[in-house]
């Protein structure tokens, strides 16, 4: 059934060729115990390894059940070893980190036998070798004789045709040796058993046949077998290690080196923790900014102004990137249209106003129109009538939705306007106000001012006909403003409003805000006033009596008309949406106006809320990228470290690799064992890193929440990121273990078994 034909095995080293086997021809019967005798170095082990498919012959042929092995592939040898051969070595070669029964089961595991069958078979053979009571022990807890019994049990557990024993009693005392040989004789009644020994007495006593080797040649054969015609067709089952087995093997291995495994995991998790922390903060902050935009800022209006600039990240960077020239003797004029902060002019037309007014009421909460502040001709009368520049008062129109206004402002004194002529004073969060505004309003500037000296203050919006007088060439402001004041529209400060958050001031700056109905009151007299009629008729500037000067910014007929209340086209429009979604729809509507329009005729809104949050999120994103890059470096470092540790593990487990190969494990299976190990470390590191990050986020969040007002949950690891990080950790460690794993798989099983452990 087993036949060697002129087998030659040559070992080639750099400058040396040695024939370990030199033309061995032998045949064996299905059932016999053959002792192989010979001095050390004569080629006994080489012969067994070749018969067992662990080593390849250089020439000749090995015939198994009549089938030549000349064209055997690796996988054929693997299944041959697993199905047909059982090895027993002098040094036992048990896998030390798994139990006795797991060692015995390993051969069956590789041939894919079910768990229950495996158990039954393993217990059965352990019973036969007398070790049933020791099956859950680790090999290190057994004596030499017991270890060899385990090795024998492992060799016979899947009923191999051939049992190969390389000096099985070589490490045992003579009494134990006899017991082991008795056992071998007893269990091997139905097999071909080849026992290498250099003890001729034992060989005589226990074998049916003695083959003597010398210098790689057969010099004596006590009972040469006739070549029996084989009736059997040789077709062993293919072997494969399940991933689960690989995991179990590696898990046990990691367990035996618990401290090292834990330290490796810890080190591997540091990079993950770094990245996870940065992701937590950028994610949490991003969420907060979104929330801010959706909740607190969704009420911020979209504004359309005659002049606007977009203060976004791009603008911000452009401003930063301006190079200053070397000091020289020049100044440089610039066109505002292409300045550092690009100012855009929106030509708000009557058409556009109609477009806005035609908007479906479901798209907005309210709209307010703001007009050129100088059309109000503001006057105060405290120690004499004085003209007040409306711009200096930050004169602005109140949003028509009081409800929305009160989400951003609080009435600290008085009330909201009831009459069209009621106005309010806006102060900041700390109740502060620019003192010049108070001076303009005729309120004495003291260290602190009672509400009562503000509430009830009066001012007037003079009618154009009382305010301007024609001197024959141009219209100018009358020199005595008393009449203008007395006959003017009397306005009264009825309330003081305080901004309640940092963004309130984006809505209304400190100063005076008036009711939108005041616009109509002013227009009702201005549109028919002399100066307006004159300006409408004239092509020169009636306020200067000169032609419009193209070199003076804004000196146009239109702007002049606006400044005297002669044109009912607003300077700015604020449109308030109810919520974030409504705002998005509103934007669509406003954008639709610009389709098919020339750039110059387009009207662009600005979304202060978006600009505000846009800058914040761009900053956070930028910072996050830098931080993640740094954290990623530690990931790379830990990956390299894992590669090294895996390599150390490969070195340590060389013997185990040899044993697994002798049991029929494929190269692929060996790779699997090490990949399983790195994956487990990667997984543990990932999970550990994520858990530690989640814990670190608690104090970090407390700190950040106290540092950044109005925000909470700033350090917040999203579940998606957490899962992603675990996956990344597994993949990274897997990659870093690939090279050591392939080194392990390529190890020559014969060499691997030879390593001392
Ligand atoms: P035995 O088991 O009879 O003591 P071996 O079969 O181990 O002998 O070795 C036979 C001969 O082949 C010895 O001279 C040994 O040095 C040589 N040999 C064995 N393995 C190798 C190897 N991997 N490389 C080179 N020479 C080897
Ligand atoms: Mg030997």
Image: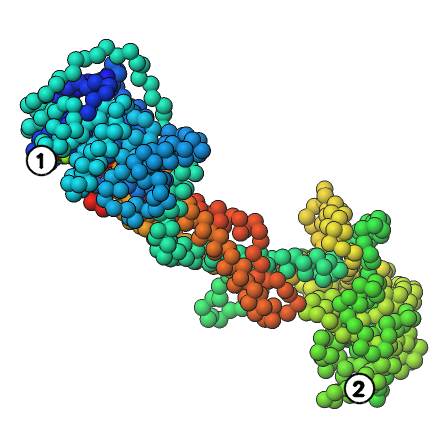
Residue toward you, 742 or 151:
151
Give percent across and percent down for residue 84: 29, 25
Return the residue at label 1. 40
Q: Is mark 2 on a helix, strand or loop?
A: loop
Whereabouts is ligand 2, in terms of quadrant? top left
Q: Residue at x 43, y 49 (%)?
A: 682
Distance of label 2 from label 1 (alpha carbons): 112 Å
Q: Which residue is drawn at 49% across and 52% down?
A: 687
Residue 96 location, quadrant: top left
- Nearer-N-terminus badge (2/1): 1
State whether label 1 is within 8 Å of ligand 1: yes
Give percent across and percent down for residue 130: 31, 38
Camera sees residue 629? no
- Report the disc number at residue 450: 2
Residue 65 location, quadrant: top left
Q: What element carries label 1?
A: loop
Camera sees residue 722? yes
- Report the disc number at residue 514: none
Please determine whether, in this image, residue 742 is positioned above or below residue 346. above
Q: Residue at x 54, y 66 (%)?
A: 700
Q: Residue at x 86, y 72 (%)?
A: 416
Residue toward you, 207 or 369:
207
Give percent across and percent down for residue 297: 71, 61
Please determine whether, in this image, residue 62 is positioned above or below residue 622. above
Left or right position of 421 against 196: right
Residue toward you, 559 or 67:
67
């Amino acid at each position: 059934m087993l036949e060697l034909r002129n087998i030659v095995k040559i070992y080639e080293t750099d400058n040396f060729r040695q024939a370990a086997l030199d033309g061995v021809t032998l045949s064996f019967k299905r059932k016999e115990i053959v002792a192989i005798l010979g001095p050390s170095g004569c080629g006994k082990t080489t012969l067994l390894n070749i018969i067992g498919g662990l080593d390849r012959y250089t020439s000749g042929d090995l015939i198994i059940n009549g089938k030549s092995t000349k064209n055997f592939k690796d996988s054929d040898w693997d299944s041959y070893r697993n199905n047909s051969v059982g090895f027993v070595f002098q040094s036992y070669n048990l896998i030390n980190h798994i139990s006795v029964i797991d060692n015995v089961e390993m051969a069956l595991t590789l041939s894919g036998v079910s768990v229950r069958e495996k158990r039954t078979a393993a217990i059965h053979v352990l019973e036969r070798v007398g070790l049933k009571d020791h099956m859950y022990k680790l090999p290190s807890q057994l004596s030499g004789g017991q270890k060899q019994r385990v090795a024998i049990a492992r060799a016979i557990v899947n009923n191999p045709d051939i049992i190969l024993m390389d000096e099985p009693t070589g490490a045992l005392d003579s009494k134990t040796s006899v017991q082991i040989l008795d056992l071998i004789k007893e269990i091997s009644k139905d097999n071909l058993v080849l026992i290498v020994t250099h003890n001729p007495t034992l060989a005589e006593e226990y074998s049916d046949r003695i083959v003597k080797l010398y210098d790689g040649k057969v010099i004596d054969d006590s009972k040469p077998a006739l070549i029996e015609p084989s009736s059997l067709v040789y077709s062993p089952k293919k072997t494969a290690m399940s991933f689960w087995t690989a995991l179990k093997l590696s898990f046990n291995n990691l367990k035996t080196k618990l401290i090292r495994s834990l330290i490796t995991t810890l080190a591997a998790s540091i990079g993950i923790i770094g990245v996870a922390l940065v992701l937590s903060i950028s994610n949490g902050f991003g969420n907060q900014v979104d929330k801010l935009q959706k909740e607190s800022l969704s009420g911020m209006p979209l504004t359309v102004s005659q002049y606007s600039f977009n203060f976004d990240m791009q603008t911000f960077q452009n401003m930063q990137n301006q190079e200053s020239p070397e000091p020289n003797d020049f100044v440089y004029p610039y066109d505002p249209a292409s300045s550092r902060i690009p100012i855009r002019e929106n030509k708000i037309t009557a058409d556009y106003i109609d477009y806005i007014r035609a908007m479906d009421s479901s798209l907005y909460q309210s709209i307010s129109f703001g007009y050129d502040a100088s059309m109000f001709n503001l006057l105060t009368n405290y120690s004499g009538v004085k003209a007040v520049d409306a711009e200096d008062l930050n004169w602005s129109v109140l949003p028509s939705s009081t409800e929305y206004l009160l989400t951003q402002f609080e009435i600290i004194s008085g009330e909201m306007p009831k009459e069209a002529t009621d106005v309010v004073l806006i102060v900041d969060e700390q109740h502060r106000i620019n003192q010049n505004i108070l001076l303009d309003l005729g309120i004495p500037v003291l260290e602190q001012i009672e509400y009562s000296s503000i509430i009830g203050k009066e001012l007037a919006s003079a009618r154009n006909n009382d305010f301007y007088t024609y001197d024959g060439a141009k219209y100018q402001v009358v020199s005595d403003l008393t009449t203008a004041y007395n006959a003017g529209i009397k306005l009264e400060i009825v309330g003081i409003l305080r901004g309640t958050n940092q963004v309130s001031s984006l809505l209304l700056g400190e100063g005076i805000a008036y009711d939108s109905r005041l616009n109509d009151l002013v227009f009702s007299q201005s549109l028919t006033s002399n100066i307006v009629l004159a300006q409408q008729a004239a092509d020169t500037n009636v306020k200067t009596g000169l032609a419009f000067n193209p070199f003076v910014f804004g000196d146009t007929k239109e702007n002049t008309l606006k400044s005297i209340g002669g044109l009912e086209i607003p300077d700015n429009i604020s449109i308030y949406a109810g919520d974030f979604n409504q705002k998005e729809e509103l934007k669509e509507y406003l954008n639709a106006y610009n389709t098919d329009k020339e750039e110059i005729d387009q009207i662009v809104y600005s979304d202060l809320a978006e600009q505000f949050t846009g800058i914040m999120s761009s900053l956070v994103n930028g910072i996050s990228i830098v931080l993640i890059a740094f954290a990623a470096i530690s990931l790379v470092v830990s990956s390299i470290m894992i590669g090294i540790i895996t390599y150390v593990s490969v070195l340590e487990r060389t013997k185990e690799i040899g044993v697994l190969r002798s049991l029929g494990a494929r190269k692929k299976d060996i790779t699997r064992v090490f990949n399983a190990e790195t994956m487990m470390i990667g997984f543990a590191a990932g999970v550990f890193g994520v858990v530690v990050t989640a814990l670190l986020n608690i104090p970090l969040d407390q700190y950040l929440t106290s540092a950044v007002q109005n925000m909470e949950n700033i350090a917040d690891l999203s579940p998606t990121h957490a899962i992603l990080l675990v996956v990344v950790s597994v993949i990274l460690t897997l990659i870093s273990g690939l090279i050591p794993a392939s080194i392990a798989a390529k190890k020559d099983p014969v060499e691997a078994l030879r390593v001392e452990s």
